[in-house]
Image (cartoon, grey):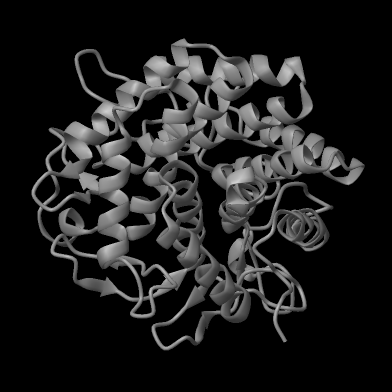
Amino acid sequence: MTVDLELESGSLERYLVDRVLPFWLEHGRDLERGGWHLFLGPDLEPSPESDFRRCVVQSRQLYSLSLAYRHEPRTSFRSAIDESLEHLFARFEDRDHGGWFFTTNPDGSVREDWKDPYAHAFVLLGLATCHHATGDARVLKLAQNVRSLIETRFRAPGEAGFQARKKRDWQPIAPPPDRQQNPHMHLLEAYCALYEGTRDRSLLDSCREIVGMLRERFIDPETSTLGEFFDQDWKPLPGEEGARVEPGHHFEWTWLLYRYSALSGDESCLDLADQLYSRGIEHGLTPDGASAVDCIDRAGNVTDPRQRVWPQTELLKALAARWEVRGDRDARERLGRVLEKCAVERIDPETGAWREQIGADGSVIDTRYYASSVYHIALAISELVRVTALPTWKT
């Protein structure tokens, strides 16, 4: 038995609003202490290792609920949105120094107090999408405040890009943490989301800067691969970390660049999207071409053949974008195969939830359900709903 998931807008939308979010509303919330559990075991009970709260996950759940609310404004979605907002501000906001703590304990005490641009990007994304879904002017003001904080606190005069994490009082950490492309990618995503709801063109300037970082710093011009970890001068780290390439991020950037171009009218980044997509398709897939592997090296050799949830959802998004923007019929055909494989091997037919990790042999190697993956799943399904509803889909 497999989950009934057809590549058709109505079927996909019903799956999103009737199965994906309701599953987490029923099993993922801590109704006694507030917030969202990080992991659920196969018995659908919270896993022991999930007894703390991540700012990123709380923000991602706010985002996912807001996305679902845009598709269908259910009272249950709106109530959970309000609860998530309240929990995020009550438990993660640093009222002394500003910004957001990285993790807290279920009782509300601070667990890890550093400030991280990755987490702040998701706070902004959650708030921006919540405003777009609900029209709540108060949430828009909060989102604008977070954007201002990111711009002032995570930048250093005369330096490119955004800095890595800082101490609670915003002082630098010594020695400074390695720099990463990933927070920049999600800041671009958050800025696009805020622009979509406000049409504030200053956000496009920030987007353009991040796209410039991608072109000048993150992509290796010799191999057309995307780096992950860099030193303070934005040079790839030595060894395995510097050679690490994640196909999922190739596909995630592909979708983001196409989206940014559509919002801004700036087509100068489309060559980067095509380049990242092609490299990911060529070297980042399983032999059947229907799943994305976790990791390859600069030469295109697979170094980690696992197939976690998030690279699959990013592959789905990239394929949908390739069809929409480039009319790529191979992408459209592959999209059907990827979704079918997910429905057969990855999505539990009883719960509709996604199994987190599949091994190279197709076996399930992690039976938990990850709250952090809901954001990836909800966004991918929402994009498929949108693209399959386009008139060009039927041509």
Looking at the picture, does residue 74 appear above or below residue 9? Answer: above
> Do we see residue 162 in this rendering?
no
User: In the rendered view, does 364 fall on the left or right side of 28?
Assistant: left
- Residue 221 position by quadrant: top left
Image quarter where the N terminus lies is bottom right
The residue nearer to you, when weighing 85 against 200, is 200
Residue 378 placement (x, y as % from top left): 64, 52
- Residue 206 position by quadrant: top left
User: In the rendered view, does 308 fall on the left or right side of 64?
Assistant: left
Label count reads 0
> Do we see residue 14 in this rendering?
yes
Residue 130 placement (x, y as % from top left): 70, 31
User: In the rendered view, does 209 fall on the left or right side of 348?
Assistant: left
- Residue at 36% of width from left, 67% of height from top? 294
Question: Going by the picture, which residue comes out furthest to the right?
Answer: 75
Looking at the picture, does residue 371 appear above or below residue 118? Answer: below
User: In the rendered view, does 237 fall on the left or right side of 32?
Assistant: left
Residue 157 placement (x, y as % from top left): 24, 13
Residue 220 placement (x, y as % from top left): 14, 46
- Residue 116 position by quadrant: top left
The residue nearer to you, when weighing 198 against 327, is 327
- Residue at 72% of width from left, 75% of height from top? 3
The residue nearer to you, when weighing 256 against 294, is 256
The residue nearer to you, when weighing 87 against 25, is 25
- Residue at 16% of width from left, 62% of height from top? 240
Looking at the picture, does residue 290 appear above or below residue 240? Answer: below
- Residue at 60% of width from left, 56% of height from top? 377
Question: Going by the picture, which residue comes out furthest to the front?
Answer: 395
